[in-house]
Amino acid sequence: MRCAVIGHVEWIESVLVDHVPGPGQIAHAAADWAESAGGGAVVAVQLTKLAGTCDFFTALGDDELGHRSVERLTALGVDVHVEWFGTTRRAFVQVDADGERTITTVGPKLRPRTLPAMDDYDAVFFVAGEPEALRTARAACFIAATPRELPTLLEGGVPLDLLVGSGTDPGERYDGGLDVSLLVLTEGGHGGVAGGQRFEPAPVPGPVADTYGAGDSFAAALCFALARGDDLDAALALATRAGAAVITGKGPFIAQISDAGGR
């Protein structure tokens, strides 16, 4: 399969906190991990591990963190294609004793603006980009997206094969308005809803380290499986396994699955 991702990158600095502070409170933290991540990067690496290769179309600042991000993602096997402008976005992640993460971003999200022809791609995941990039991506055989970019999806006005996001995150709320073949909303450890039917989570294969990247890895695996022709039950089995695996490793990449499994 030939796969591509259109999306953003954030340079993440994660710390372990004794608690997530409320207004006026102080939390004590220990350094955890620093990594090139963000939704676009996480989906691209997971697709690379499942498909063997993935083109990642992104935008980065021509700065130290931008070039470090390209080096890191390239080392993970991703074919990175960059539009250089602006300043690379950063984010700070607080991970509590239960492995739950709270994210604060710094700076605007850099969205890819232009793409090459996409008609020879089997699967494209649109994580973030400008509306014209979305229209170009629609030439692929299968296109998935996330409700995080709902204004762009509405402006782009193309039919989507898969819309997948969190059913508990207000930032991914979806109340309709798009031409979507399959809507999937996750609920973390409670599974989620796919096409109006509930599905169960996969068992977590070890102690929880942190939950960063679980949702995006789930989404990437679901896109991959459906695009290659799996039925929905088989695709959800692969996707829930991908989401469960990630939370056993520090950061989004260490524990991502690389076995695409059966159909």
Image (spheres, rainbow, N blue to C red):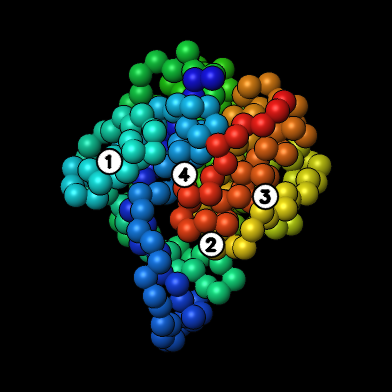
Q: Nearer the viewer, mark 1 or mark 3?
A: 1
Q: Secondary structure at mark 2?
A: loop
Identified by mark 4, the residue type is Val
Q: Amino acid at mark 3?
A: Thr
**Residue under label 2:** 210
Q: Mark 2 touching mark 4, by CB under 8 A? A: no
Element class at badge 4: helix
Identify the disc placed on residue 186. Answer: 3
Q: Secondary structure at mark 1?
A: helix
Mark toward the viewer: 3 or 2: 2
* Residue receiving disc 4: 42
Mark 3, Cα crowd under 10 Å, few <14 / some 14-19 / many 20+, is many
**Residue at the limit of the structure toward the top, as seen here:** 120
* The label number, if any, that marks residue 227 in the structure image: none
Seen from the viewer's position, the closer of residues 18 and 167 is 18
Q: Cα distance, mark 4 to mark 3? A: 17 Å
Mark 2 and mark 1: Cα distance apart in space: 24 Å
Q: Are marks 1 and 3 in contact (CB under 8 Å)?
A: no
Nearer the N terminus, badge 2 or badge 4?
Answer: 4
Rendering coords of residue 22 (x, y %): 49, 81
x, y (%) of residue 2?
49, 20
Judge left or right: residue 188 versus residue 135.
right
Q: Check disc 3 and report its element: helix, strand or loop.
A: strand
Query: Tags 4 and 3 in contact by the CB under 8 Å rule?
Result: no
Q: Give the residue number, with chain letter if any, for mark 1.
A: 71
- Quarter of the picture containing the N terminus is top right
Instruction: State whether residue 193 is above or below residue 137.
Output: below
